[in-house]
Amino acid sequence: MSYSIPIEDLLSEEAQNLLEKEKNSNPFDFRLRYAKDTHLPIEEIALQIEALQRIKSKVDDWQAHKQLIFPSPLAAEQASSKITAKHKAQYLKGEVLIDLTGGLGVDTFFLSHNFAKVFYVEKSNRHAQAAAHNFAILGAKNIKVCHQSAEDFLMQYEGKADWIYIDPARRKDKQKVFRLEDCQPNLEVLLQSKLPAKQMLLKLAPMLDIKAALQQLPQTEAVHILALQNECKELLFFLDMERAVDLPMPRITCQHIDSDGKIQNFDFDFDTEAQAQVQYSNPLDYLYQPNAAILKGGAFRSIAQSFGIFKIARHTHLYTSMEYCENFPGRVWRVEAEVQAQKKHIKRHFKEGKAMIISRNYPLSAEKLGQKLGLQSGGELYLIAMGLEREKKTLLLAKRLE
């Protein structure tokens, strides 16, 4: 979408009333119902409805600003949440920030609270147009909107900055991409150019291979893996453009934010991970599963060594202990019994015919296992299937501990 947004038409009283009335409607049905209302920008209102529905769970307090405009539903879908944006903001402070990939502007807005001057750079006309309008509504007077590409901005910018922030577009020909050179802007090329800031934060795709990225980004001084409610959301690479390239691998910080806003941190590095001592054991009294950030980081040996617990098997990323391990960064269960993979045996233990099923390094997926054993998903009891050492496997009845 490169054409302009008819902001004045969208802000008319009639359009605003209709948007408020239909904001929870199905956008497709809305288009059909109001197709004959040609005096209103029905297609644009439909796009606003869809975008509002996608953004409301991400930035809840923006709902109070009725006149905010969104460039597209996709922009709302790809935007950072308020929680992750504020989390990043605690690490970036200074006088001048340059956001080279402005997008919807959620990150720009929350990062701007720690800077005197912020440059929002965006090559999309609709995105830049919406951002300029929205920042004014939100009272973000220290943000300057620059409608141009990242490359063009850097060529003409003559000042200095404390930080550069980049969240590159990860779609090419409508397909998701993960390699740095496939992103827009091309990070491989951009990082070789003369930059006006010593420090840079890159927000990269959760699917990215961290070790491979570090080979391409030797300036990295820290990596944060950010997970929200056990779903990996962001990989954050903190770069020092003057960092010596022959230094050891940087620390990896695995950060998990739960539904209450509580943050769990676990630090490790790949060198110590390779050397960490780990012992294996069949399931004991307690069972542990690290949170999504730790699993993404690959701290499989470090987590066992740090908490003094046993790993179930080399390729089974579950852990166990005789005594309860407090403050473990992940989910914890108390093992109640070992069960057989037979329907009659399962019925004795799961009398309601329901269980939360987890399968790790086991021949059947959780869904397939549930079908085989006649169990529906749900309830308070867990059925945990796993592979053990020496190609053995087991099923456990377990209860989740808070």
Image: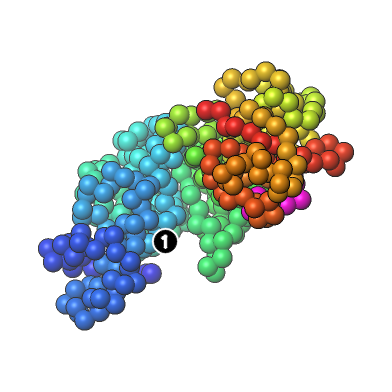
Q: Which residues fall within the magenta stretch?
A: 360-367
Q: Main secondary structure of the magenta part?
A: loop
In the rendered image, the residue lying farthest to the left is 13
The x and y percentages for residue 237 are 56, 40
Between residue 108 and residue 337, name the one nearer to us: 337
Q: Is residue 12 visible?
A: no
Give the side of residue 239 with respect to residue 89, left or right: right
In the rendered image, the residue lying farthest to the top is 323
**Residue, disc 1:** 74
**Residue shown at 34% from the left, 57% from the top:** 53
As for residue 361 lying within the magenta part, the answer is yes
Q: Is residue 280 visible?
A: yes
The x and y percentages for residue 178 are 60, 55
In the rendered structure, which amino acid carries the disc numbered 1? Leu
Position of residue 376 relative to residue 214, above or below, is below
Quarter of the figure with residue 396:
top right
